[in-house]
């Protein structure tokens, strides 16, 4: 069973409702005023577009795309674009809200946005994918710009997709606009360290969380659901820090070896066969089974809502680090908390990507680029500061790390929103 089909088999939960529930709890603890609650629990803008794309055989298909901005009080909107058959407005609204909190927690001057197209990009040729990307970029161009809304890669999008978007919007303007997107190739203004940034950030906060729990990384075992960019980089960097990665999975399923996986062999096997299954010395596991393995650290780095009230009682990891956005539902969160399982929330754990996207945006605006070592040092400083502020709030309020992160982030956005006021 694939990851998508497993997710489809789970009880339907609204990602947007989950995001609002998380905000409501933080708002209650912060005692926010009714006007601030009303403003912050809704998105600012929703753009839905239906656009034609000419296929290679001459047919015309009409696709649906979205761009949602949640809050702009702290700066331009920032958030990725995903191409996925299950992408819908409900999901994109939730992701936009989470981006607002993520940027605020990292204390970078962005608001939250997200976008996507309901499409299976694997079913498209490269030429069809380019035409779809460029047409979608044109459709959302009334919102997107270096000072207003800056997209980035997300699920099933890449540096090449960002290059097509940047080129399309530059051609419309009549001059090159590198700061209109982040996550671009280096040749057109991308930043060093950006492809590894999210996974690097996951490894940084995982290490800090282990220190907090008194766990020794050199004896800790790890399972990672999702072996794409975030999951694979997380695996390599956790292994480099002494963790033993015992299980990984992708959309087609996963593999498990309690003694640890040799990641170079895993990646070579995946390149050679296109699948993780079949690696000598490792048994096959489904994505659902991987979540319940007896490991110390679990990194869900694929899709949202994979840990629910239905399986939270069977999670055996002591520490869950959310590499994906929204992989643990609020009901599951409560179960994990009661069971003494620590969750490092997505708005903290995967904030490395947007942090280095901010660095890329700054570099593009000033046309001056930094060394990768400088970027990684700055990233670690941001991530560790955000973890420390989260832990401080969690301890002071006697709440989970998720709620500690929300208290920091929501307070910052609420303050900015309040100071700016309502116009007119």
Image (spheres, helix red, strand yellow):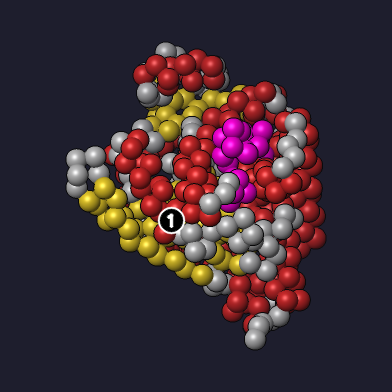
Q: Is residue 351 magenta?
A: no
> Few, some or many C-alpha atoms within 10 Å of disc 1 (few <14, some 14-19, many ≥20)?
some
Tell which residue pokes out farthest to the front in this image. 174
Is 53 displayed left or right of 300 in the figure? left
Is 282 displayed left or right of 106 in the figure? left
Vertical placement of 173 versus 224: above or below? below
Q: Residue at x 58, y 46 (%)?
A: 176
Is 34 displayed left or right of 57 in the figure? right
The image position of residue 93, as x and y in percent, is 49, 63
Q: Is residue 188 magenta?
A: yes
The image position of residue 186, as x and y in percent, is 61, 33
Residues drawn in magenta: 177-202
Residue 91 seen in this snapshot: no
The image position of residue 334, as x and y in percent, is 57, 58
Q: Quadrant of the C terminus?
A: bottom right
Residue 139 figure quarter: bottom left
Vertical placement of 385 versus 419: above or below? above
Vertical placement of 375 versus 417: above or below? above
Q: Residue at x 58, y 41 (%)?
A: 183
Is 309 displayed left or right of 21 in the figure? left
Question: Which is nearer the eye, 112 or 161?
Answer: 161
Q: Residue at x 66, y 78 (%)?
A: 36
Q: Secondary structure at mark 1?
A: helix
């Amino acid at each position: 069973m694939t990851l998508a089909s497993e997710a489809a088999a789970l009880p339907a939960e609204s990602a947007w409702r989950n995001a609002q529930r998380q905000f409501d709890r933080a708002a209650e603890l912060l005692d926010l005023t009714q006007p601030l609650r009303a403003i912050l629990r809704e998105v600012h803008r929703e753009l839905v577009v239906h656009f034609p794309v000419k296929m290679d055989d001459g047919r015309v298909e009409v696709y649906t795309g979205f761009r949602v901005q949640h809050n702009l009080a702290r700066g331009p909107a920032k958030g990725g674009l995903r191409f996925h058959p299950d992408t819908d407005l409900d999901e994109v609204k939730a992701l936009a809200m989470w981006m607002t909190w993520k940027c605020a927690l990292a204390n970078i001057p962005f608001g939250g946005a997200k976008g996507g197209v309901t499409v299976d990009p694997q079913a498209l040729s490269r030429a069809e994918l380019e035409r779809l990307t460029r047409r979608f970029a044109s459709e959302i161009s009334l919102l997107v710009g270096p000072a207003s809304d800056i997209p980035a890669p997300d699920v099933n999008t890449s540096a090449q997709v960002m290059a097509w978007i940047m080129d399309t919007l530059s051609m419309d303007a009549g001059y090159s606009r590198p700061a209109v997107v982040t996550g671009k190739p280096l040749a057109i203004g991308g930043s060093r360290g950006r492809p590894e940034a999210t996974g690097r950030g996951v490894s940084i906060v995982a290490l800090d969380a282990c220190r907090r729990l008194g766990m020794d990384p050199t004896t800790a075992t790890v399972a990672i659901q999702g072996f794409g960019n975030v999951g694979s980089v997380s695996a390599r960097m956790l292994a480099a820090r002494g963790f033993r990665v015992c299980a990984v999975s992708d959309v087609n399923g996963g593999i498990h070896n309690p003694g640890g996986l040799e990641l170079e062999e895993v990646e070579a096997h995946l390149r050679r066969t296109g699948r993780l299954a079949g690696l000598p010395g490792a048994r096959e596991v489904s994505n659902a089974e991987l979540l319940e393995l007896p490991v110390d650290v679990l990194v869900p780095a694929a899709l949202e809502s994979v840990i629910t009230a239905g399986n939270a009682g069977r999670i055996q990891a002591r520490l869950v680090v959310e590499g994906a956005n929204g992989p643990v539902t609020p009901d599951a969160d409560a179960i994990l908390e009661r069971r003494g399982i620590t969750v490092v929330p997505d708005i903290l754990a995967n904030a490395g990507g947007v942090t280095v996207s901010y660095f890329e945006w700054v570099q593009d605006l000033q046309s001056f680029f930094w060394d990768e070592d400088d970027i990684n040092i700055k990233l670690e400083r941001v991530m560790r500061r955000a973890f420390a502020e989260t832990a401080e709030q969690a301890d002071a309020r006697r709440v989970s790390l998720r709620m500690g992160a929300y208290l920091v982030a929501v307070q910052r956005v609420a303050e900015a929103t309040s100071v700016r006021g309502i116009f007119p």
